[in-house]
Structure formats: structure tokens, C-alpha cells
Image (cartoon, rainbow, N blue to C red):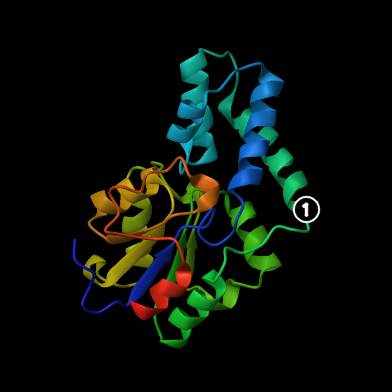
Amino acid sequence: MKIPTEIKCVIFDMDGVIIDSEEIHKKAYYETFISIGVDVSDELYKSLTGSSTINAFQKLVAHFKLDLNPEELVLNKRKRYVNFFENDPTLHLVKDVEDLIKHCYNKGLTLVLASSSAMVNIDRVFNRFNLNPYFTAKISGADLTASKPHPEIFEKAALLGKTSKENCIVIEDSDNGIKAANDAGIFVIGYKNPMAADQTLKNADVIIDDFSELQKII
């Protein structure tokens, strides 16, 4: 797909695109896996990347035939994530993404956050790093009937941005997120996050490894 001739709305994923939180999510997940006695392979975990937490645990409960409530597992994992989040002073925004956000905002573009994370986690990040003033809307996993790789999240993001999909771009770092953007018919930029090296990004329209490059495009 060709880049839109006129970009009006930029749709950001959060984990791994705005904030380097993939590692603490992974730690929280694996602590939870250990607590319930399941051995999750790297390949299985990779297939969950980009999905909502409830969707991930629904898959795991089915995969391992567990007699456990996925919603309780979500709460278990979330407590562990919050503990890591609040006790990690080194947690930071992805390099150059704040400059990109301000660049887009100053150009008058509409910014929408489209994340599979729970809104409580989104708000925690946005409040800590003062990102709320730049974004018109935020979508969480709870707002969806289907998780990535289903295209619903990006279709809703375009609607909230009050922009036709032809004038939107998505920035993603996961294969599930890229498939969702592909199926929504929206141009997608794959960000090669070094913390998510298991994601191929092969179906992205453009692949970058430095957000400063994007300021030349947008």
C-alpha cells in the first residue's frame, strides 16, 4: 500500500511503540505462568503479542485445558505488571517518540492511541509521561469485541479520529497489530523495537528502526 498523499490522523500502538514496556509485560506474564504451573514456549508467547490480556489468557486456558477463570488470571498478571511499573525508575518512552508525537501535534494532525492494554494501564503511562494533551482519543482492549489481529481496533480509531482510513497511518511493533491494520485497510508503519526481536513486521508497508526517520515522512 502507498503512503497516503495527505496524512490527517496518526494512530499509535502503545506498548513497544510509545513506551518500552514489553519487557515488564513479559516478566509479569511469565511470573503468572509460573504461579499457575504452565510452561509457555517462546513461540506460544510470540503468538499472544499484541493481543489483549483477556484474549491471551482465554487462549492459554484453552491451550492447556485449565480449569481457571481467565478474568482472575488477568487480575493476577495486572498486579504483577503494576508492581514492576511503579518500582522501575528506568522505565522510559521509546527513543525519539516524544519528539514525533509533538511534531505530529504541532502539524495539526489528529493523534489516536489504539492499544490492547487495559485503560488503567494506558492512563498510568499517559499520566506518568504527560501525553494526554496530544491525543484526541484513546482506545483500550476493553472497548473491543475482538482483539488484534482483528481489525476492529483500527477501524474504531479512524472513526474516533474523524478521518477516512485513506488519510490515516498506523504505527505498530507487532505482527498481530500489523495484520489488524492490513485488514482494516490502513497504511501501517512497522517499528523494529529491539525489545521485540521475535516480531518479523514482514507485512508492514514501511519498516523503520528510528522514529526520527518518520518526521521526514509525516
Whether residue 151 can be seen here: no
Q: State the residue in front, 158 or 1.
A: 1
Q: State the residue in front, 174 or 154.
A: 174
Q: Is residue 174 above or below residue 156?
A: above
Q: State the residue in front, 142 or 205.
A: 205
Q: Position of residue 129 (x, y in %)?
A: 66, 69
Picture quadrant of residue 28: top right
Residue shown at 59% from the left, 23% from the top: 69
Q: Position of residue 16 (x, y in %)?
A: 53, 54
Is residue 193 left or right of 86 when viewed as pictured? left
Q: Which quarter of the figure is the N terminus placed in?
A: bottom left
Q: Position of residue 174 (x, y in %)?
A: 42, 47
Q: Position of residue 40 (x, y in %)?
A: 55, 23
Q: Is residue 110 above or below residue 58?
A: below
Is residue 85 left or right of 217 when viewed as pictured? right
Which residue position is annotated with label 1? 86
Q: Which quarter of the figure is the C terminus placed in?
A: bottom left
Is residue 125 left or right of 63 when viewed as pictured? right
Residue shown at 36% from the left, 79% from the top: 216
Whether residue 22 can be seen here: yes
Residue shown at 26% from the left, 52% from the top: 182
Q: Is residue 105 above or below residue 158?
A: below
Picture quadrant of residue 215: bottom left
Q: Residues within 10 Å of mark 1 (few under 14, many from 20)?
A: few
Is residue 146 left or right of 19 when viewed as pictured? left
Residue shown at 33% from the left, 77% from the top: 217
Labels in figure, total:
1
Q: Is residue 135 above or below residue 56?
A: below
Please name the amino acid that badge 1 sits on. Glu
- Disc 1 is placed on an element classified as helix
